[in-house]
Amino acid sequence: MKCRLLWTLLAVSVLAVSFAGCGGGDKGADDGVVRLQFWHAMGGPLGDALDVLVAEFNENHSDIEIQSISMGRYQALSQKIMAAVAAGEPPDLAQVYEAWTENLIENGSAESMSKYVNGPNGFSQEELDDFIPGMIETSTWDGEIYSFPFNKSVRALYWNKVEFAKVGLTRAPTNWDEYLAYVKKLTRDTDGDGKIDQWGTAGQISAWMFENLLVQNGGEILTDDGKRAAFDSPEGVEALEFMVELLTEYGKITAGYEYQNDFQAGKIGMIEGSTVSLAFMEGKYTFDMALAPLPENKRKASFFAGTNVVIFADSPDVNKAAAWEFLKWFTSPEITARWAAMTGYAPVRRSSMDLPVMQERFAEIEGLESVFTQLEYAAFEPRSAAWYAGRKYLEEYGVEAALRKQMEPSEALAAAARSVNAELED
Amino acid sequence: MIWLENLRRKKFMDPLTAAFYLVPAGIIVVTFRMVPIASAFILSFFDVKMGRIRGFVGLAQYLDLFRDPTFFSSLGTTAYYVAGVVPASLFLSLLAAVLLNQKIRALGFYRTVFFLPVVTSLVAVSMVWKWIFHPRLGLLNYVFEVFGGNAMLWLEEPRGIFEMMASGLGWSWWPDGFVGPSLALIAVIIVAIWRGIGYNIVIFLAGLQNIPDQYYEAARIDGANPRGVFWRVTWPLLSPTTFYVLLSTTITSFQVFTQIYLMTGPPVGGPMGTTKVIVYYLFEKGFDAGGNMGYASAVALILFLIILSLTLVQRRLVESRVYY
């Protein structure tokens, strides 16, 4: 009896172990084709869109093969890159936030792209001026370009025109007062059972939403020298109070992107989201929907989100040149326009907006063109590694604590600022 | 292997033979246990970013650690986790093992059922449970609502369970220090118990089958009732096994990572950091952007010391009551 038990155990363990072992890539088959590993975090429709473009690039470049490897999410991507760099086996290309780039530069792991950008196979000044303002700057450290704009998005308001019409509204709110008044109007009990079943808005716990409200309200994330938190200002407190009122009185807070499902189901009047949310919602709603730029308050302001791509210094020169070839191709007006049309990311080139592929998209999605007008004044978040850690504190201690009503907005922001300042001091 | 046989016959060669057999395991233990522990110890005195040593910092990282509130809150979370998993897992697996040790029908089926979670990939298990706990689409809330209960947020609930019980009883105030583990952590604990008992049951079963039948027969002849048989015969003779299960469950509970990484968040360790256990904290400090492997090593070393001292204390306290 004992023996049989042991044998069963052994057999099952062997089975389990044999499932665990897998993986291992083939590097460097010697057939003159340069194979590049491109690590990214694009999943779902974004990953599909990227794979379409990568396949097209590979087809048109018989000597280069980009191997697109998705790590699923940014946090996992960051951890994999850091571990791979530590182990001395980084990929050739990877999507990175500015803060990670700063770490990689400091470590000598990021290749300067200036020599490619300004080289014979680079971009002319005219072409560089065609990039959306700030996109090259956010990739530049001490005059050297270390990363290249890849997928940047801005926030947008998605509004359900049918629900708006039911309460007599015909357009999206353009300022905070209207924003609040509209969500109030849209929040109601339609079947008369005493429970609210139709909500004005919904959202998730997001530092990005708060940051946008903060700058619209005249606040700043950090002080000018970048050494201390500035989001705990009266403007910040007001912005967070506004966010709490929107999302807890007239809206619902969901984990992750669940709120988009509720919006698609027609239960929510309007939601804020990334322009990329479009790719995830496409074809999943049946009502008449439109996009609009975020409502303004004291000023028109907005933050970009998303990453750039770096080339790793450890790669052989042929790989680096091939990697640049890919980035140059990917940021050409035509390709970035198609990337934008497929995903909702902002095209990185101004001239892309006039191309048929973008114009068709604008005709298809009402309001998308006006959302992209935000690109002209959208700013970038502080890019230091300390802020990357600090931003997590803002989200966890500041925004989450206030939205879950664990703390008053002013207390929550003060607590978050203390942690952020401690991080910035190190 | 005639030469080995010859070696063994000559008595003076015995230590050498023993060494010969010990070498393979020895190499593995040294390479994958001793060397990492030693290097973590050394690294904890250095500033290490992205695999490069940036300089000697002495005890500075340990001092930083003792000033880091997140370190202590993650220790507290881990303590809650261990306290939640170990006693419940021990009790349930012992109960199941005793029941499975009876002569009942379809014994093999039950044993398989209890052991299945152990051989299922922890990743798959975590993802499935994450769905079960989903506040809106999850099976658990559905069942709750069918029976007239209230839907709960489960993995998204940052409030402590003591506080929630108190407010359920209508008390509006509860002392801040005693809110207890968050419901999210409880959800993770439930999965850990469910997943872990199968393994413990097998160990307990082996222990139970090691108890010679004569003792039971003697007890029966003396007219002992089933409860008496359990407490006078089974429990003392099972004590080495119980001790082993207690030790191993405690140690693995301190080292929990995968369920936390896969089930909680985003961000992992949420809501509001209430499920951020010490190993995830270590991982975050070491591998996130801007991470410092030296600092993470310091955390790892503290964890090592905690587990080691706890194990020693357990030996002292419990071993005197173990009958070998």
Image (cartoon, coloured by chain):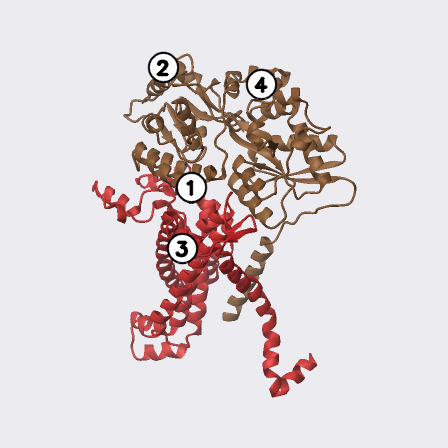
Chain colours: A brown, B red
Q: Residue, x 62% and y 25% (percent of image)?
A: A336
10 Å crowding of disc 3: few (<14), some (14-19), many (20+): many
Q: Secondary structure at mark 1?
A: helix
Q: Nearer the viewer, residue B169 or B267?
A: B267
Q: Quadrant of residue A401?
A: top left
Seen at 68% across and 43% down, the residue is A315
* Amino acid at circle 1: Glu
Up-down relation of residue A292 to residue B77 (above or below): above
User: Mark 3 or mark 4: which is in front?
Assistant: 4
| Disc 1 to disc 3, C-alpha distance | 42 Å
Is there a contact, CB below 8 Å, between mark 2 and mark 3?
A: no
- x, y percent for residue B90: 38, 61
- Position above or below: A230 against B214: above
| Residue occupying the far right of the picture | A31
Q: Is residue B266 visible?
A: no
Q: Chain of mark 2?
A: A
Are labels 4 and 2 assigned to the same chain? yes
Tag on residue A250? none
Q: Quadrant of the N terminus of chain B?
A: bottom right
**Which numbered disc, 4 or 2, marks the residue closer to the eye?**
4
Q: Earlier in the sequence, mark 4 or mark 1?
A: 4
Residue topped by disc 2: A167
Write down the chain letter for disc 1. Answer: A
What's the amino acid at mark 2? Val
Q: Real-space Cα distance between discs 3 and 4?
A: 52 Å
Q: In terms of secondary structure, where does tag 4 sit?
A: helix
Question: Disc 3 designates what residue?
Answer: B193
Q: What residue sits right under mark 1 in the picture? A: A425
